[in-house]
Image (spheres, rainbow, N blue to C red):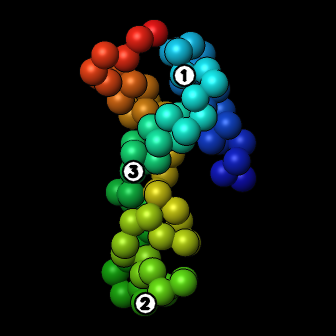
């Protein structure tokens, strides 16, 4: 179910900032950089890992970069130096 959420967040960003249209790498980088890891999982006592990457290291193979934060992504774009809307 993460795909529809990511697509929706990407669409919101491109709607708010049309200059991002046709720049999927930049949109992806913004969404990854602004994802939050706080409250994603309780890592206390968790010894689970996948591909040698523990759940306490970000990004990891179990929960990726964390939880999508569309508002934080919007704020990031607003504050990008020289961003041309």
Name the residue that disc number 2 marks: 47
Residue drawn at x 39%, y 24% as measured from the top left: 77
Name the residue that disc number 3 marks: 36
Q: Residues within 10 Å of mark 2 (few under 14, many from 20)?
A: few
Identify the disc placed on residue 30: none
Of the two numbered discs 1 and 2 on the same chain, state the one appearing first in sequence: 1
Q: Position of residue 57 (x, y in %)?
A: 37, 72
- In the image, taking residue 44 as reference, residue 15 lies left or right, namely right
Q: Secondary structure at mark 3?
A: loop
Q: Position of residue 76 (x, y in %)?
A: 35, 29
Viewer can see residue 72: yes
Q: Position of residue 78 (x, y in %)?
A: 35, 19
- In the image, taking residue 61 as reference, residue 56 lies left or right, namely left
**27 vs 44, nearest the viewer:** 27
The relative height of residue 29 versus residue 83 in the rendered view (above or below) is below
Name the residue that disc number 1 marks: 20
Residue drawn at x 39%, y 42% as measured from the top left: 34
């Amino acid at each position: 179910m993460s795909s529809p959420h990511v697509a929706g967040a990407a669409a919101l960003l491109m709607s708010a900032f049309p200059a991002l249209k046709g720049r999927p790498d930049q949109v992806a980088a913004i969404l990854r950089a602004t994802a939050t890891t706080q409250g994603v999982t309780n890592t206390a006592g968790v010894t689970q890992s996948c591909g040698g990457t523990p759940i306490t290291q970000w990004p990891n193979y179990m929960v990726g970069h964390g939880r999508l934060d569309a508002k934080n992504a919007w704020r990031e774009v607003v504050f990008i130096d020289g961003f041309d809307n």
